[in-house]
Image (tube, grey):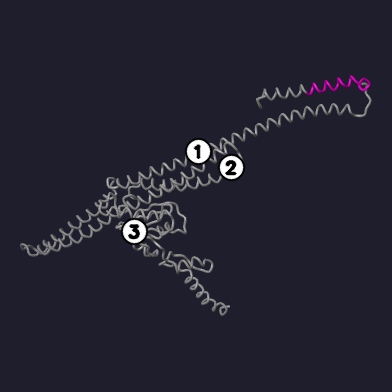
Amino acid sequence: MEDSRGPLLPTSHQESGHSQNNGRVNVEGWGNRGGSLFPGLRKRGHGHGSRSWIKIDQDGASKIVELDKATIMRHCSLPSRDLRLLDPLFIYPSAILGREKAIVVNLEQIRCIITAEEVILMNSLDNSVLQYEAEFCRRLQNNKDQAEDLPFEFGALELALELTCSSLDAQVKELEMEIYPVLDELASSISTLNLERVRRLKGQLLALTQRVQKVHDEIEQLMDDDGDMAEMYLTEKKLRSEAYEAGDLDSENDISEHTKGGSKSAPCSPIRSVSGVQKLQRAFSSVVNSSRHGSLSTTSNGDNIVELEMLLEAYFVAIDNTLSKLSSHKEYIDDTEDLINIKLGNIQNQLIQFELLLTAATFVATVFAVVTGVFGMNFEDSVFDNPSTFHWVVIVTGLGCCIMFLSFLFYFKHKKVFPV
């Protein structure tokens, strides 16, 4: 048994190593597993790790570059989960994420990474992407000789919000032009074709409402969090980081010069001189640390995020207006459905009323048929000796049936089953 099991161990080890080699994660690509069951993903992971991006710098110059996931993660200091939002193979709702050195934007078709110096836009033939590239380059080139009102990252974010809001609003208007004629036609003529058209438009309306609602919630959530808004001041954080580095170098130079000057000063004990230098170094380090923490804390101050808050508020009002339009369209559809249900209920009531009348008439006619059928049987009776007597029997039976039918009508009217 041991001999039979022995040779199996190296074989299984080789197979596991082979499977791990085929299924390893491609660091330079998008990190997909390969295998015989997923040939497309294996090809994508090993041969097509780089993607096409559009890079727009501060001068308004754009160029198409090939970048892989690892390069973007190192350049922008982003985790892998943030880049999944930009992958066109995945369907994620709209999101705006503020990170240490970048802003990750996923708004409908506009998927980009905004830094303090450039915008890395997902290359696509979509009209929104092409419009974003052309418009942002034009704005940057026009603002070269002018003082910029907004930082670079806010200008890029503003254009993404502007194009997204305008695109969603245009889709709402286009849907509105199609909804109202169909609903009016359905209200006047209830048919299967009109009901199917309204069902299709209602599905489109609900899908569009979810997209607009997600953008609305994302902007609202961002406005409610001062920390997230403070993270988006990339230019300010970059300047402060450079100032920190310069401040650290200056403080070290001052300390070294002071120590050199202290050694040439009036004579004192070595212990006192060393302690004085230590106190001076501690003082400088405390000043640098306090200034550093104080500068970082002012970033989250309410006065410094007013600019971004006002920018977001403007587009929050626009997207809220679009959401209100969708709500009114949905209410109009619901009102039309209520009207249709009322009409169908009225038709159903009329059918029930007609059925009651028909049932009452059938009952009366059945009674008359029973009487005539009894006298139509082959038996001897004195009634048949005088023909006029049988005529009176038929007349009395007919009058009785008429009185019975009128009694039914009076009962229905008394019970308010239907107006007669």
Dot 3 amino acid type: Ile
Q: Picture coordinates of residue 382 (x, y %)? A: 93, 21
Dot 2 amino acid type: Leu
Quadrant the C terminus occupies = top right
Q: Which residue is mark 1?
A: 331
Q: CA distance from mark 1 to mark 3?
A: 43 Å
Callout 1 secondary element: helix
Q: Earlier in the sequence, mark 3 or mark 2?
A: 3
Q: Magenta-highlighted stretch: main secondary structure?
A: helix
Q: Which residue is mark 3?
A: 56
Callout 3 secondary element: strand
Q: Picture coordinates of residue 81 (x, y %)? A: 41, 58
Q: Is residue 197 left or right of residue 58?
A: right
Q: Nearer the viewer, mark 2 or mark 1?
A: 2
Q: Which residue is mark 2?
A: 195
Query: Do callouts 3 and 2 mark residues in contact (Cβ within 8 Å)?
Result: no
Please give the name of the residue rendered at 16% of the width and 62% of the height, measured from the top-left corner. Answer: 253
Which residues make up the magenta segment?
383-401
